[in-house]
Image (cartoon, rainbow, N blue to C red):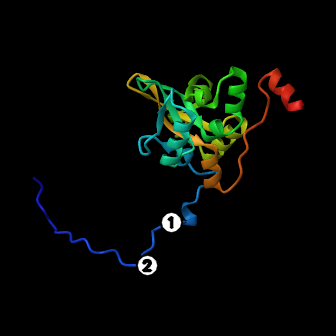
Amino acid sequence: MAEINYRLQPKQVPSGVNLVSPERDPSKRISEDSPAISVMTDLKIITPFQIEQSASLEEINNKMIACGVRLLFVSDKQGLLKGLVTSNDILGEKPMLFVTKNGCSRADIEAQDMMTPISKLEAIPLHEIEKANVADIVAALENSRRHHLLVLQHNEGRDCVRGIISITQVAHQLGKEITPSQRASSFAQLNRALG
């Protein structure tokens, strides 16, 4: 049993107490010259939120609200990563298009129907992030059609997701807007874009 070094005596919280806010030290502000790792959400530090691929739209939305996030990793029953789902996926036009195409109701839609599958996600190895700066990340996000980049780390003979970089978070930290390329990747997308 540990030795008690000091007897703590809790007291009533005084009225008129305020919360401490993160320091807004301009010298610690992110710039495009800052290390790229400074804009990565490190999943060794921040616990990633997951949802099972069979979860309903309501379950996804409720979990996002409860966790205060706009992105969830989607996994199967064994915990294997299958993709990710964002608030834009479940609150945008995607569910309506799915219902129309499949002749089902909104209640029938599952996470696996709305997620971006792992095969369509883009990733950068951690060792490259460690050499890059924020300007490199901004360029990668602007040239990508994605709002998120995964960061992979080789661990015990296999790759695992070590972090995630969000275009929204990078823009917020830099204090500037970043817009991913809207380039068409197929004839159908080009045709839709041209009207």
As rendered, which of 36 and 101 lies closer to the eye?
101
Q: Amino acid at mark 2?
A: Gly
- Mark 2 to mark 1 CA distance (whole Å): 21 Å
Q: Identify the residue position indicated by label 1 in the image.
A: 23
Seen at 60% across and 49% down, the residue is 169
As rendered, which of 126 and 103 lies closer to the eye?
103
For the C terminus, give its image quadrant. Answer: top right
Q: Is residue 94 above or below residue 12?
A: above
Query: Mark 1, residues whose alpha carbon is within 10 Å: few (<14), some, or many (≥20)?
Result: few
Q: Position of residue 129 (x, y in %)?
A: 55, 38
Tag on residue 34? none
Q: Earlier in the sequence, mark 2 or mark 1?
A: 2
Tag on residue 16? 2
Q: Is residue 177 left or right of residue 123?
A: right
| Extreme residue in the right direction | 195
Labels 2 & 1 near each other (Cβ < 8 A): no
Seen at 46% across and 24% down, the residue is 76
As rendered, which of 3 and 126 lies closer to the eye?
3
Which is in the foreground here, disc 2 or disc 1? 2
Q: Position of residue 62 (x, y in %)?
A: 52, 43
Q: Is residue 4 above or below residue 114?
A: below
